Image: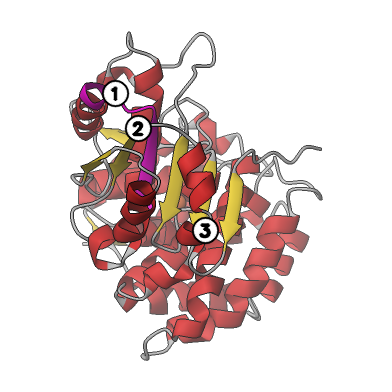
Amino acid sequence: MRFYVPTDIYVEKNCVKNHAKDLLAIGKRALVMTGRSSAAANGSLIDVTEVLKAGEIPFQIFNEVEENPSTDTVGKALQIARDFNADYVIGIGGGSAIDAAKAVALLLSNPDLHADELHKVPQNPLDHVPVVAVPTTCGTGSEVTPVAIITNRKINLKKSIPHVIFPTLALVDGKYLASAKKTLIVNTAVDALAHMVESILNVKSNTLNRMCPEYGLKLWGEYKDTLLSDSDVDESLYEKLMFTSTIAGMSIAQTSTAVPHGMSYDLTLHAGVPHGPAVGYFLAAYTEVCAKFVPQDVAKILSLLQLQNIGEFYEMLRHLIGTCTVTRQMRDNFAAAMKVNHSKLDLVPGSITAKDIDYIYEKSLVVE
Ligand SMILES: [Fe+2]
């Protein structure tokens, strides 16, 4: 058994300021990558740039990372990083900004590699310049995973790139959730939930790496009623939400995500569904199918979430993210692609059949 997360992780209020020294020690010139507005609105960008200014670290901001970052965006940021001679990359935001920062960090160290070639499997592991991650949503976990999900729009492919890029430093502060809408908090919390469930319902799950998802699911179960209620999320829960998301990231760093994530990418790419709900639509049906193989694990997950049975799991997710409608053609195409997606199917803790996959799609998506 092995547990491996080489990232230096701090989870606390005012984390960026408290650990300014760590942030400044990583490099000499920083590229700061964010989305268009949220990092400015939630205070994370100003926290980071104040530290960089005080430490006299020159920096350049690239604030054009979109949801589902593309190879084109990565290429654009890379050019700016090269022109600026950046020797480390700071990603501030949700998974998109952090994943794009990882891709730029890889390309900066590998001048022969083009952004459009990021999905090609390398012959040998590739180096990268250091990455600092400052998450501002409570779902991605990218601050502690080696994974970067990048979309190549030229070939309609949304997938993790096959490179190991753990951030050197993760600065996790729940206060950045204060300006987030409830829908964003719910959607990203569902993503974190999926990371933990898929980490347990996974052939790579073992007693060592299970510590993370089991503890995280317990926390999730404790605040699930707040997510389900109509009221706003109380400030006192921000750190717990963010902490769970980081724990969920540590979970998939050991096992990787499983079938629901594999199914979600087509839904996002072809139907524009945000990542959290796209994963969440498949989660209960995947859990139900896995109950045939590992009933005791499913029972444990439900008990940690304070749910009585799988029916309550379906109901909870439906309440949180609603339903998703697609055409029959889309659903058939998605199912056909999933049936040959062995990178995810091989992680199922049992012999999943084509019939099981069809069942998951039938239970998870509404056909118009
Ligand atoms: Fe995810």
Q: Which residue corresponds to the image point at 47% horizontal and 69% vertical from the top-left?
A: 174
Few, some or many C-alpha atoms within 10 Å of disc 3 (few <14, some 14-19, many ≥20)? many
The residue that label 2 is drawn on is 29
Judging by the rendered image, the residue that carries numbered circle 1 is 85
Residue 9 x %, y %: 59, 51
User: Upstream in the sequence, badge 1 or badge 3?
Assistant: 1
Residue 33 at what x, y percent from top left? 29, 43
For this rendering, which residue is in front, 123 or 366?
123
Relative to 192, residue 351 above or below: above
Point out the image quarter for the N terminus. Answer: top right
Task: Tell me whether the residue at label 2 lies in contact with that at label 1, contact meaning CB atoms closer than 8 angstroms.
Answer: yes
What residue lies at 21% left-to-right and 47% top-to-bottom? 66
- Distance (Cα) linking label 2 and label 1: 7 Å
Residue range (magenta): 82-95
Residue 193 sits above or below residue 329 on the image: below
Q: Is residue 124 above or below residue 187?
A: above
Disc 3 to disc 2, how far (Cα)? 36 Å
Look at the numbered disc 3 and say if its residue's Cβ is closer than 8 Å to ligand 1.
Answer: yes
Name the mark on residue 194. Answer: 3
Given the image, on which type of amino acid does mark 1 rest?
Answer: Asn
Q: Quadrant of the C terminus?
A: bottom left
Residue 332 at x, y percent in the picture:
31, 44
Q: Nearer the viewer, mark 3 or mark 2?
A: 2
Task: Tell me, yes or no, whether the highlighted magenta stretch contains residue 241.
Answer: no
Label 2 vs 1, first from the N-terminus = 2
Q: Is residue 320 left or right of residue 84?
A: right
What amino acid is at disc 2?
A: Arg
